[in-house]
Amino acid sequence: MKCVKFVRESRYKSYKGQVVKVAKNLLNRRFRTPYALQKLVTDVTEFKCSNDEKLYLCPIMDLYNVEIIGFSMSKRPSLDFVLDSLKQVLPIIEKRPEYRTTIHSDQGWHY
């Protein structure tokens, strides 16, 4: 695997239209928790591969133990691609509810 440093101009931008509703920032930079599955975070990362191809990764991480509990990969950053990682995590959350779960992402998921 080879990583090439990106420059700001080439960064992936997931949304270029009008934002209808901006979600509240419930974490407020409080990234630690004593409860499993209370605070989950996610984002989309773009990898530039050989032959100018791109690969997108959407992991979901539990801030309790910084464990990746679900992820999806795709050649296109579509809504279905993002929902695939969420579908992996929902059964885990439903089986072990200790506390209310908050899933935090950047504001790029407006479709």
Image (cartoon, rainbow, N blue to C red):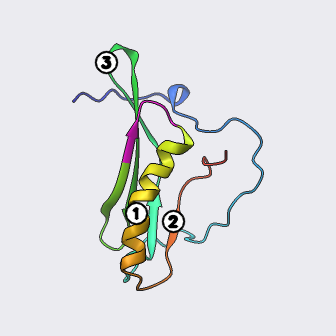
Crowd tier of the residue under label 3, counting other residues whose Cα lies within 10 Å: few below 14, some 14–19, many 20 or above: few
**Residue 81, position in %: x, y?**
47, 43
> Marks 1 and 2, Cα distance to the nearest angstrom?
10 Å
Which residue is outermost to the left?
A: 1
* C-beta proximity under 8 Å, tags 3 and 2: no
Q: Position of residue 47 (x, y in %)?
A: 38, 32
Q: Which mark is residue 103?
A: 2
Q: Which residues are magenta?
A: 72-77
**Residue at (37%, 78%) from the top-left corner?**
95
Residue in view at x 54 percent, y 38 percent: 78
Q: Name which residue lies at 31% across and 65% down.
A: 66
Q: Is residue 59 magenta?
A: no
The residue to which callout 3 is attached is 50
The answer to whether the residues at label 1 and label 2 have Cβ atoms under 8 Å apart is yes
Q: Nearer the viewer, residue 84 or 7?
A: 84
Residue type, label 2: Ile
Q: Which residue bears the numbered disc 1?
A: 89
Q: Nearer the viewer, residue 52 or 96?
A: 96
**Residue 30: image location, x then y, percent:** 49, 73
